[in-house]
Amino acid sequence: MCTLPDLEPEESAEEFAAEPQQEVARLKAEVDDLHRALQTNAVLDQAVGVLMAAGRLTPEQGWDALRDLSGRMDVECQDLAGSIVAWGRDGRLPTDLRAQLRAWDRRQVHRPTDADEAVP
């Protein structure tokens, strides 16, 4: 016996029309998330740069300092990075951050110096 295929659509016209709108909304949210991530990364990178310049640190040491200070001060890295970037811009550093930076610096065993670079 021959049967005819089911010609009824699996989705209603409303459901079919809603799918692209849902995808557009999802993609817009993803783009917003990516923009926030780029802004966050830029501030973190800038803060590491300020720490590198101020303390003559390597990039790795700058990241280590940012992570360590964030944990010791119980402050989100993003917020701490904003304070460090502001310090690089206007020269003002909150007293608690200044104390933590000094303490972090004292804990460091060795940092490369010009003298290290001169040794063959």
Image (cartoon, rainbow, N blue to C red):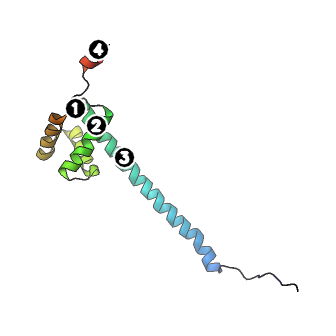
Residues at marks 4 and 1 touching, judged by CB atoms closer than 8 Å: no
Q: Residue at x 54, y 69 (%)?
A: 22
- The answer to which of 42 and 69 lies nearer the viewer is 69
Dot 4: what SS? loop
User: Quick one: label 3 or label 1, which is nearer the N terminus?
Assistant: 3
Quick check: marks 4 and 2 in contact, CB under 8 Å? Answer: no
Report whether 82 appears left or right of 7.
Answer: left
Q: Name which residue type carries label 2.
A: Gly
Of 94 and 6, which appears nearest the observer?
Answer: 6
Q: Which x, y percent locates residue 39?
A: 37, 49
Q: CA distance from mark 2 to mark 3?
A: 14 Å
**Circle 3 residue:** 41
- The image quadrant where one finds the N terminus is bottom right
Give the residue furthest to the top.
Answer: 120
Q: Disc count in the image?
A: 4
Q: Amino acid at mark 1?
A: Gly
Query: What residue is disc 4 on?
Result: 119
Residue located at (46% from left, 62% from top):
29
SS at mark 2? helix
Lower position in the chain sequence, tag 4 or tag 2: 2
- Mark 4 or mark 1: which is in front? 4
Q: Identify the residue shown where x is 26% and y is 36%.
A: 50
The residue identified by callout 2 is 62
The amino acid marked with disc number 3 is Asn
In the displayed structure, 33 sits above or below 20; it is: above
Return the x and y of residue 78 as percentages of the image width and height: 29, 50
- Of badges 4 and 2, the one in the foreground is 4
Q: Dot 4, crowdedness within 10 Å: few (<14), some or many (≥20)?
A: few
Q: Amino acid at mark 4?
A: Val
